[in-house]
Amino acid sequence: MDWAGLMRLGLCQLGLAPEAFWRLTPVELMVMLGADATQTPLTRARLDELARAYPDTWKGGGDGA
């Protein structure tokens, strides 16, 4: 994600204070910038696909440390 570009748009184009910018979700920011916020909903199949592509990995001995 191009955070520098999004920050520039949010702070300069929209005139948001940094605190307001960081409280926004990416979708809220895109809507404020005029982007179409409609996206395909996350389906179970897509979630499973993402979980396979980016599996959770644990560091340490598995004891939460």
Image (cartoon, rainbow, N blue to C red):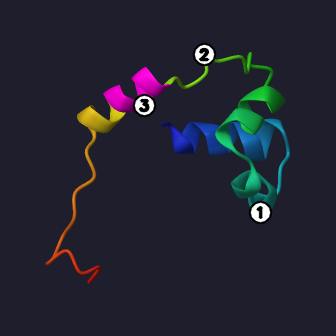
Give the answer, above or below, for where 38 lies relative to 15: above
| Most common secondary structure along the magenta stretch | helix
Which of the two marks, 1 or 3, is nearer to us in this view? Answer: 3
Question: Are the residues flagged by discs 2 and 3 in contact, CB closer than 8 Å?
Answer: no
Q: For mark 2, what is the residue? A: 40
Q: Which circle's residue, 2 or 3, is located before the other in the chain?
A: 2
Judged from the image, the secondary structure of the residue bearing numbered disc 1 is helix
Looking at the rendering, the stretch of residues picked out in magenta corresponds to 44-49
The label shown at residue 47 is 3
Residue at screen point 63% across, 38% down: 6
Hey, which quadrant is residue 52 in on the image? top left
Residue type at tag 3: Leu
- Quadrant of the frame with the C terminus: bottom left
Q: Quadrant of residue 12?
A: top right
Image location (x, y in percent) of residue 46: 42, 23
Residue drawn at x 28%, y 52% as measured from the top left: 56
| Residue at the image position 74 percent from the left and 37 percent from the top | 29
Q: Looking at this view, name the residue that lies furthest to the left.
A: 61
Estimate the spatial distance between the alpha carbons at disc 2 and disc 3, rounded to whole Å: 12 Å
> Looking at the image, is 2 positioned above or below residue 15?
above
Label total for image: 3
**Crowding at mark 2 (Cα within 10 Å: few <14, some 14-19, many 20+):** few
- Residue 23 image offset from top left, x and y in percent: 75, 56
Q: Earlier in the sequence, mark 1 or mark 3?
A: 1
Label number found at residue 19: 1
| Nearest the eye: 11 or 21 | 21
The quadrant holding residue 51 is top left
Q: Is residue 35 magenta?
A: no
Kindly report the distance in space between the C-alpha atoms of the residues bearing marks 1 and 3.
31 Å
Q: Amino acid at mark 1?
A: Glu
Within-10-Å neighbours for mark 1: few <14, some 14–19, many 20+: few
Q: Secondary structure at mark 2?
A: loop
